[in-house]
């Protein structure tokens, strides 16, 4: 019986550990999000993508190689990915125009 009790305790600890990792990763997944789309409109401090307006003032802008870009790179028709953490924009990637 002592032998079975040890296995049961090990199994219970394993299940609790597994659930803890799963729950923590679920919480992280909810906090980090991305909006991808084409810029529909650009103003001095915001862009419109997929019918949502997003503040760009103070947000780091990058190209797909990770090089820093200026606000002038935000132009109508450009493809962007807007990264959020805890519902706050952390960065925007601006993609080059694709040549067909």
Image: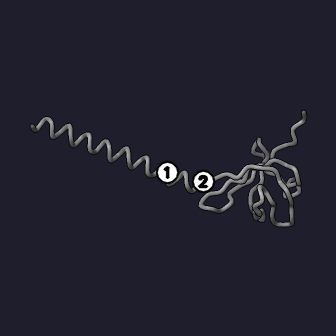
Looking at the image, which residue is at 77% across and 63% down? 53
Q: Position of residue 83 (x, y in %)?
A: 68, 53
From the viewer's perspective, is 55 left or right of 42?
Answer: left
Residue 74, numbered circle: none
Q: What residue would you read off at disc 2?
A: 32
Left or right: residue 52 versus residue 73 is left
Is residue 64 found left or right of 85 in the rendered image?
right
Residue 44 lies, with reference to residue 72, above or below; the image says below
Which of disc 2 and disc 1 is earlier in sequence? 1
Image quadrant holding the N terminus, namely: top left
Q: Which residue is mark 1?
A: 26
The residue drawn where x is 77% and y is 50% is: 37
- Quick check: 73 above or below 14? below
Q: Residue at x 75, y 61 (%)?
A: 52
Q: Residues within 10 Å of mark 2 (few under 14, many from 20)?
A: some
Along the viewing direction, whichever of 67 and 74 lies nearer the viewer: 74
Image quadrant occupied by the C terminus: top right
Assign a secondary structure to mark 1: helix
On screen, residue 18 versus residue 30, left or right, reads left
Camera-side residue of 78 and 51: 51
| Colour scheme of the rendered structure | one colour
């Amino acid at each position: 019986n002592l032998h079975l009790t040890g296995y049961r305790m090990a199994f219970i600890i394993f299940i609790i550990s597994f659930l803890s990792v799963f729950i923590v990763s679920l919480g992280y997944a909810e906090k980090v999000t991305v909006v991808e789309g084409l810029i529909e409109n650009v103003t001095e401090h915001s862009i419109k993508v997929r019918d949502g307006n997003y503040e760009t003032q103070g947000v780091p802008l990058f190209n797909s190689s990770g090089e820093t870009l200026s606000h002038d790179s935000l132009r109508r028709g450009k493809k962007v990915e807007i990264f959020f953490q805890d519902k706050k924009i952390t960065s925007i990637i601006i993609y080059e125009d694709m040549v067909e």
